[in-house]
Image (cartoon, rainbow, N blue to C red):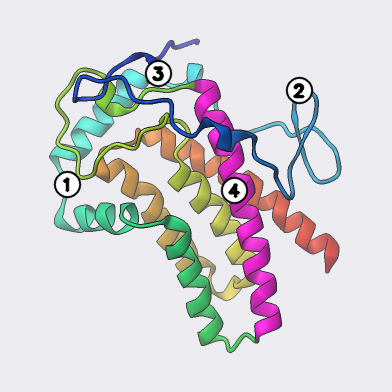
């Protein structure tokens, strides 16, 4: 069933103003693992990628808005803390600190650490580019663009909602970091699930933004891990 949705570029935020266009160009920056074909994204071996993320037409945005409203009226102090921690400062910095902490715990030397950080940041570059491309292609409105007063924990970012970058980054990082630190996989998954959910708790994303963002991020992470395995 095709569900129409509000467009981010057509509806005002709660201050009554249409948001500025933002940095849409990031969706066209060069990538490291993923390539661009004439009309499709390609994997490192030149094969077209069939993205697993849902088209926004397949999402019930009215129900999604109800989830946001219900979440914001039942927030716990711990959920507010999670929203503020993951939503303040740069997410990549926070995830990089997790890598450095694991490097200390497992006494990883500089050459191996440089390799881990290199692959991680290359993966982050690609997931951001693809996420930004999809954000501006689909132009999905934020929760605060439905004419409701929402008691959001954080200010709403000035770019489209779907998919959530926190979620896509977290999904990709979960796969890549679990490859390098398999013994820490449960901890990695738990921390990055917090990062993803923080955007719903903050009131700046729909739950579908998060769920589908993770799907996108994990798919890109799996592509990166296939490259890693092919190189030994």
> What's the CA distance linking mark 2 and mark 1?
43 Å
Q: Secondary structure at mark 4?
A: helix
Q: Position of residue 215 (x, y in %)?
A: 55, 41
Side of 108 relative to 160 (left or right) = right
> What's the CA distance linking mark 4 and mark 2?
22 Å
Q: Nearer the viewer, residue 113 or 55?
A: 113
Disc 2 residue crowd, few under 14, some 14–19, many 20+, Cα 10 Å: few
Q: Secondary structure at mark 1?
A: loop
> What's the CA distance linking mark 1 and mark 3?
29 Å
Q: Nearer the viewer, mark 3 or mark 4?
A: 3
User: Which comes sooner in the sequence, label 1 or label 3?
Assistant: 3
User: Which comes sooner in the sequence, label 1 or label 4?
Assistant: 1
What range of the chain is rendered magenta?
110-138
Q: Nearer the viewer, residue 203 or 12?
A: 12
Which of the 4 quarters of the picture holds residue 15? top left
User: Which comes sooner in the sequence, label 3 or label 2?
Assistant: 3
- Tell me the residue that label 2 is attached to: 39
- Tell me the residue that label 4 is attached to: 218
Disc 1 residue crowd, few under 14, some 14–19, many 20+, Cα 10 Å: few
Contact between marks 2 and 1 (CB within 8 A): the answer is no
Contact between marks 1 and 3 (CB within 8 A): the answer is no
- Tell me the residue that label 3 is attached to: 9
- Tell me the residue that label 1 is attached to: 75
Quadrant (top left/top right/bottom left/bottom right) for the C terminus: bottom right
Tell whether position 36 is magenta.
no
- Residue at the image position 45 percent from the left and 63 percent from the top: 93
Q: Main secondary structure of the magenta part?
A: helix
- As drawn, 5 above or below 207: above
């Amino acid at each position: 069933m095709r569900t129409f949705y509000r467009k981010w570029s057509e509806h005002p935020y709660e201050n009554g103003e249409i948001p500025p266009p933002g940095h849409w160009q990031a969706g066209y920056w060069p990538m490291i693992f993923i390539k661009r074909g004439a009309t499709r994204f390609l994997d490192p071996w030149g094969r077209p990628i069939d993205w697993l993320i849902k088209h926004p037409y397949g999402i019930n945005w009215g129900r999604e808005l109800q989830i946001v409203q219900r979440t914001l009226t039942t927030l716990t102090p711990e959920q507010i803390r999670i929203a503020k921690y993951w939503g303040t400062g740069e997410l990549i910095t926070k995830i990089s600190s997790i890598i450095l902490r694991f490097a200390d715990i497992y006494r990883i030397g500089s050459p191996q650490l440089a390799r881990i950080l290199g692959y991680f940041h290359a993966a982050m570059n690609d997931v951001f580019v693809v996420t930004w491309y999809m954000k501006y292609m689909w132009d999905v409105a934020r929760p605060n663009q439905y004419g409701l007063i929402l008691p959001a924990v954080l200010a709403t970012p000035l770019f489209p909602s779907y998919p959530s970058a926190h979620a896509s980054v977290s999904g990709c990082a979960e796969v890549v970091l679990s490859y390098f630190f398999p013994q820490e996989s449960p901890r990695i998954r738990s921390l990055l699930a917090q990062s993803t959910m923080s955007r719903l708790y903050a009131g700046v994303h729909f739950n579908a933004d998060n769920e589908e963002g993770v799907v996108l991020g994990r798919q890109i992470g799996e592509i990166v891990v296939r490259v890693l395995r092919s190189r030994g």
